[in-house]
Amino acid sequence: MDGIIIINKPKEYTSNDVVCKIKKILKEKVGHTGTLDPNATGVLPLLIGKGTLLSKYLINHNKKYEAIIKLGKKTDTADLEGKVIEEKEINKNYLTKENIENIFKELIGEQEQTPPIYSAIKVNGKKLYEYARNGKNIQIEPRKIKIYNLELNKINLKDNEITFTVECSKGTYIRTLCETITEKIDTVGYMKELKRLKVGEFNIENSVTIKEIENGHYNLITIEKFFEEKQKIILENKKNQLFLNGVQLTYNLKDDLYKIYNENNEFIGIGIIRNKLLKRDIIL
């Protein structure tokens, strides 16, 4: 079994918890393409078997999330799990649809964002949250990110909450974005809930639960399917053996990835052409 399964991660599971659970169910090698916080839910692509070799093609995908901001309180982790470190009054005059949508428009585009101290980014070989837990201050360098779209879904004046959808580049911290939004409405806040709706072309509508996988109900995106838009090359037997043995073959084709088939039209893997030379990349 080689390919990708799209999981709808439940709350209170770490991404590694999900990997370990699915590994036991499928009895296959399993990996993932990027962590989700334990209290976040939604799309978590899992790489199964030789599908783990696809990780290099999935690292730069854009993301789409739905988030809820709780206004009036700031936590040290910028989410529901943290300790409240500041409280501030909420001016309800700022909580209008027009005002918040104008703020969202200001935030669209390329910008620099400083990751939260409670994150897994490594500095000098240690994760930031390890410094935070030990009470050590560390300089965090801002990173370039891009917000493609911000959409207001709901303003809950009773519970002082804002629900929104964001499409953003890899590396964007939604917890930090939530704090930025609250600053612009002259208060503080934290990310109460987060659901990942999309990673690249993987949508939550096509995801399955852990329970469904336990019951054998899931779709495997095969390696062949993942590269379905790429051109195919059919290798006759001698060339096929050379290719499988790692020999580079001359092909007058453009530099790109190609689906490789044997002379019986059976899919055998992915090759890459660079400077008119075809070499193996993923072999089943």
Image: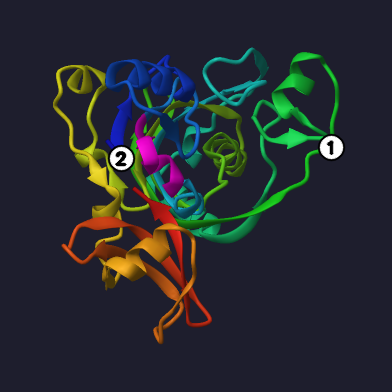
Residue displayed at 54% across by 32% down: 91
Question: In the drawing, does residue 208 fall left or right of residue 144?
Answer: left
Of marks 2 and 1, which one's residue comes earlier in the chain? 2
Query: Which mark identifies residue 2?
Result: 2
Q: Compare residues 148 and 209 and report the one nearer the observer.
A: 209
Residue 215 position within the rendered picture, expressed as x and y whole percent measured from the top left: 15, 18
Query: Which mark identifies residue 139?
Result: 1
Residue displayed at 26% across by 39% down: 204
Q: Quadrant of residue 9?
A: top left
Q: Quadrant of residue 194?
A: top left
- What SS does tag 1 mark? loop
- Looking at the rendered structure, the kind of residue marked 2 is Asp
- What SS does tag 2 mark? loop
Q: Compare residues 215 and 269 and report the one nearer the observer.
A: 269
User: Height in image: 120 above or below 259?
Assistant: above
Crowding at label 1, few (<14), some or many (≥20) Cα neighbours within 10 Å?
A: few
User: Height in image: 84 above or below 43?
Assistant: above
Magenta residues (range): 42-54
Residue displayed at 42% across by 14% down: 12
Question: In the drawing, does residue 218 fall left or right of residue 106?
Answer: left
